[in-house]
Image: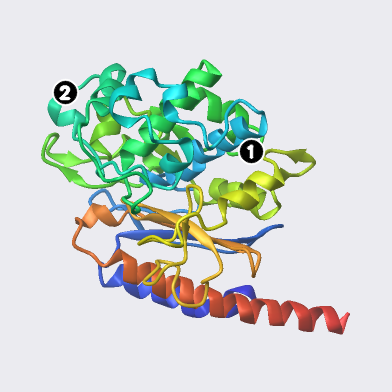
Amino acid sequence: MVQANFSRVSEFLSKAVENREVPGVVIGVTTNEKIVYKKAIGMAHYDKKIPMKENTIFDLASLTKVVSTLPSILRLLDEGLLDLDDPITYYLSSMEKNHSDITIKHLLTHTSGFQPGIDFHVQNIHKDDVIEKISQIPKKKKVGEMVIYSDLNYILLGAIIEQLVKQSIDDYTKNAFYGPLGMKNTFFNPPLQYKNRIAATEFMDTIQDYQWGKVHDENTLHFGGVSSHAGLFSTMEDLASYARMILNHGRHKNKQILSSESIKLTTQTQTSHLNLNRGLGWELYCPPSFSGQFLQDGFGHTGFTGTSIWLSKKHNYAVILLTNRVHFGRDNNIARFRRIVHNLIAISMDYYNQSAEETKCLR
């Protein structure tokens, strides 16, 4: 019955793989209780003929921002160790000269005015010197004037987190979130023994081979594989567990992982008067959103490697869509692909819920 409800989704994904739009896909749809649809199609490594499986591990790229950095900030907010309106100079004194007007909320909403990024790896800037380099940026857009998606915002958030918790964001998130949520396949710098389970990403001139088992993002790779803007690896099932915690207002089983107030706050629009619609960390619906036309109520995020997550508050489910689209290069229309998948999921979930109601009535 479930497979019949989602047959259009499966057919579309199979055709996309056949047409080489993406090398492979692992998809999962979860309610706040359980996964109701999952599928693995295509190749995790095309040249080596390694097939996608439901437990294939993906380089999440910028999903790191909302699966690692965002919950860490929210936990510290819940514990009273920071406030979102705190100026970042309260934690990072080197930012005082040029950036004293930026708050934590500006970083979370990408309204700090910073440019999208700096090629730290090209300039060979050591990880310990990154904050100083950002502090020296002389000019930027006016704070709060527009949304400019920037890795620099989350690199600064990571520095604030690590200063407060006195440990790396790697260790902190593992202990605070991934362990309690049972996310056993979520980590930075995946162990070598997992390599054959990892989806390969892009062909890299620097190594004359596909990046496989190591992070795709050049800055994160330069930093040793751990950063607060990219670097996290995970699976569909682990991300579904994380999504269920959010759909359950911060609870997992009998434990409150994050407060319901923090969860609610993150999904409220903070930039409705600006060029893009953002919550805290999350992208909110703003056409042409990758969520498609039928899931306008929700929130989500994407990763450059081909990953995404979208959660619908109204319909109470989340879509985990994982691809290694850069394995074939960057010239593919991943935004259109995501929109169509989400549209088909929305229709399929409507059929699924109708079937569930009919089954209930027959009992």
Foreground residue, 40 or 338? Answer: 338
Rendered location of residue 294, percent (x, y): 51, 77
Q: In the picture provided, is 92 more to the left or to the right than 319?
A: left
* On screen, residue 274 above or below 241: below
Mark 2, residue position = 124
What residue is drawn where x is 26% and y is 67%? 333
Q: Secondary structure at mark 1?
A: loop
Q: Is label 1 or label 2 in front?
A: 2
Q: Quadrant of the N terminus?
A: bottom right
Rendered location of residue 341, percent (x, y): 43, 71
10 Å crowding of disc 2: few (<14), some (14-19), many (20+): few
Amino acid of disc 1: Gly
Mark 1, residue position = 182
Q: Are marks 1 and 2 in contact (CB under 8 Å)?
A: no
Amino acid of disc 2: Asn
Rendered location of residue 260, percent (x, y): 70, 47
What residue is drawn where x is 55% and y is 75%? 346
Foreground residue, 362 or 259? Answer: 259
In three-dimensional space, the C-alpha distance between marks 1 and 2, rounded to whole angstroms, equals 37 Å
What residue is drawn where x is 32% and y is 40%? 151
Q: Quadrant of the C terminus?
A: bottom right
Note whether residue 141 is visible: yes
* On screen, residue 49 above or below 255: below
